Image: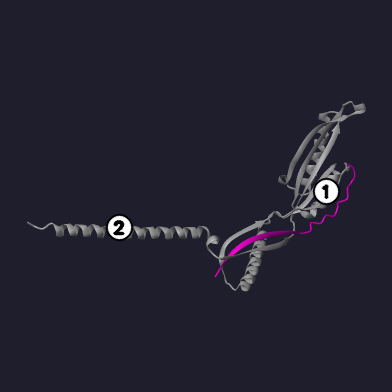
Amino acid sequence: MENPMPQLKNNRALKIFTALVMLGLFVFLGTLVANNLKSYQYIGKPTAERDTIAISGEGKVTGIPDIATVSVGLQTEKADVKSAQTENTNKMNRLIANLKNLGVDSQDIQTSYYNIYPQYDWPNGKQILRGYQVSQGVAVKIRNLSKIGDILAAAGEGGANQVSGLSFNIDDPEALRQEARVKALENAKEKADALARVAGVKLGKIVSFSEYSGTPTPLYKSYDMGGIGGGGEVAAPTVESGSMDIVVDVSVSYEIK
């Protein structure tokens, strides 16, 4: 009869070999997964895993305003609403027509408010209705800055008694903002280079970047036409647009070697 012991030993050795192979494969896969997770964490959090220099920079570009805006309004008071509305509307329609004759496009004239308020007198503490006040205002965008003085004069001739908020701005500041952005990055790089030399390290590539770019602040001019009504020519004022700054601030982190 054949001895079964060699067969049992062979089966046992095969099982042990198989178990060792499976264990080795498991360890290999576990190591691979761990390394992949570590690399993903490194990509997702570069500043947490690398030595960096963080620095700020500022870029400023001066531009010349190419548009102006102004608020023009009319206010009329009469004993009844219909009379107040009719007179105020007729004056405003004539004023808008004058603005268009001076080259202001209809899309650059926008009604900003229209109000009707009762007006009261208070003799001896008693409320008495005096009449009604109607007011209407339009926001006017002026693209031809050489016409500003003529437009303000036309507002006075047209009976406007509420003119305010004359401001200057840059219609499309993006090109100037990009120029300021480049200057800000150059400024940050100069600072980082100087800091790296002092620290005895070399700069690597940029690992993070953020910026703040505020909207250019409009330049306001005071212009009061209170009390001006229609009748007679009004001298066109001289109005200067000046200049304005566009500023971009950046924060940059460089990898150091």
Residue 201's spot in the image, x, y percent?
Answer: 58, 72
Q: Residues within 10 Å of mark 1 (few under 14, many from 20)?
A: many
Q: Is residue 249 above or below residue 167?
A: below
Of residues 138 and 11, the one nearer the viewer is 11
Question: Which residue is denoted by mark 2 in the rendering?
Answer: 22
Question: Which residue is denoted by mark 1 in the rendering?
Answer: 152
Which quarter of the picture shows residue 193?
Answer: bottom right
| Residue at the image point whose x is 81% and y is 46% from the top | 164
Q: Quadrant of the N terminus?
A: bottom left
Of residues 49 and 142, the one nearer the viewer is 49
First in sequence, mark 1 or 2: give its number: 2
Magenta-drawn segment: 230-257
Q: Quadrant of the C terminus?
A: bottom right
User: Is residue 68 toward the left or the right of residue 184 in the image?
Assistant: right
| Residue at the image point whose x is 38% and y is 58% from the top | 30
Residue 170's spot in the image, x, y percent?
Answer: 72, 55
